[in-house]
Image: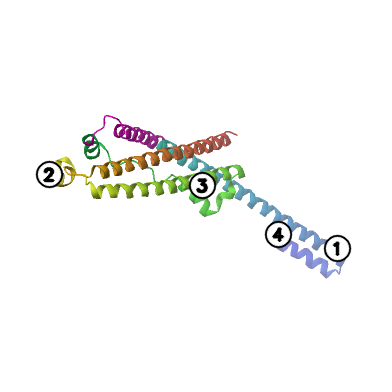
Amino acid sequence: MIKFFRKIRQKLLSENKFSKYLIYAIGEIILVVIGILIALQINNWNTERENKKLKTVYLQALVNDLTKDTVDINRIVQIQKADLESTQNFLKRIHSTTATIDTIIKMAKKEYNYSFSVKRDYANNTFNTIISSGNIELFDKELVEMLMDLNSLQIDQLERFDSHIDYYQNIMSDFMASFPIYSEVTKYDLVDRIIWNDINEKELIGKFTAGLGIRLFMFKNTVSGHLRVKEKSVEIINFIENDFEK
């Protein structure tokens, strides 16, 4: 094809037909431009098709992450609601008119569970990948705003919980320093005789009650925060699934 056009050019030049050559040259340029435009359009189609496939993969991964989170939030919220109920019952017993120091000692030593279950992160690997790769531009503005709002909720929830748990752990560390707890299996009779049989009742009640109070506050805020994250996650799942159906 190139040889064919070259022969035409050479023939026109050899015959001194400059006007015809000029028309021919312009026509050749137009053909080249059209060819470039067609190639660019084909490339754009291919890019658009690949972006559409990538977007679909991302959307499905987002749904999977958010679904996993909602299931995990449901699990941890049920556990923490039970923890709240248990903590409230301890406080009610402490403030009961029938409570005695022996009752409180029994609660602190044998009944109160000092461990608890928490959720320290969210399943946002897909979101982080989308942000770091710059592919957030593949998504509609409305979905982007929803994802950003969810990420802000998640960060706020985790930061507030870290702050609460630090405070709780400081209080309980202070409590444990004065009133160490051991398993009954270990039979620390000396510890019982020296510490628990001759305690500062005011200090015990104050520190134990303070620990229960901050634990109650911590999990009330944690549960409400998890539920806000869950609500936003479900909203995004529904938005994406509705988009798939279109």
Query: As drawn, is 117 to the left or to the right of 194?
Result: right
Q: Amino acid at mark 1?
A: Lys
Q: How far apart in space, not on screen, are marks 4 and 2 (Cα)?
A: 102 Å
The numbered mark, 1 or 2, whose residue comes first in the sequence reads 1
**If the image is split into quadrants, where does the N terminus sit?**
bottom right
Q: Which mark is residue 1?
A: 4
Query: As drawn, is 5 to the left or to the right of 180?
Result: right
Q: Amino acid at mark 4?
A: Met
Mark 1, residue position: 20
Question: Counting other residues with Cα less than 10 Å from the Cα at mark 1, is it few (<14), some (14-19), or many (20 or more)?
Answer: few
Please identify the dominant SS of the magenta region.
helix
Q: Which is closer to the viewer, label 1 or label 2? A: 2
**If the image is split into quadrants, where does the C terminus sit?**
top right
The numbered mark, 4 or 2, whose residue comes first in the sequence reads 4
Q: How far apart in space, not on screen, are marks 1 and 4 (Cα)?
A: 20 Å
Helix, strand or loop for disc 4: loop
Q: How far apart in space, not on screen, are marks 1 and 3 (Cα)?
A: 68 Å
Task: For the residues labelled 1 and 4, say whether their Cβ atoms are less than 8 Å apart.
Answer: no
The numbered mark, 1 or 4, whose residue comes first in the sequence reads 4
Task: For the residues labelled 4 and 2, say whether their Cβ atoms are less than 8 Å apart.
Answer: no
7 vs 129: above or below: below
The verdict on residue 72 being magenta is no
Q: Residue at x 82, y 69 (%)?
A: 13
Question: Counting other residues with Cα less than 10 Å from the Cα at mark 4, is it few (<14), some (14-19), or many (20 or more)?
Answer: few
Q: Which is closer to the viewer, label 4 or label 3? A: 3
The verdict on residue 95 being magenta is yes
Helix, strand or loop for disc 2: helix
Q: Which residues are magenta?
A: 74-101
Helix, strand or loop for disc 3: helix
Q: Amino acid at mark 3?
A: Ser
Task: For the residues labelled 1 and 3, say whether their Cβ atoms are less than 8 Å apart.
Answer: no
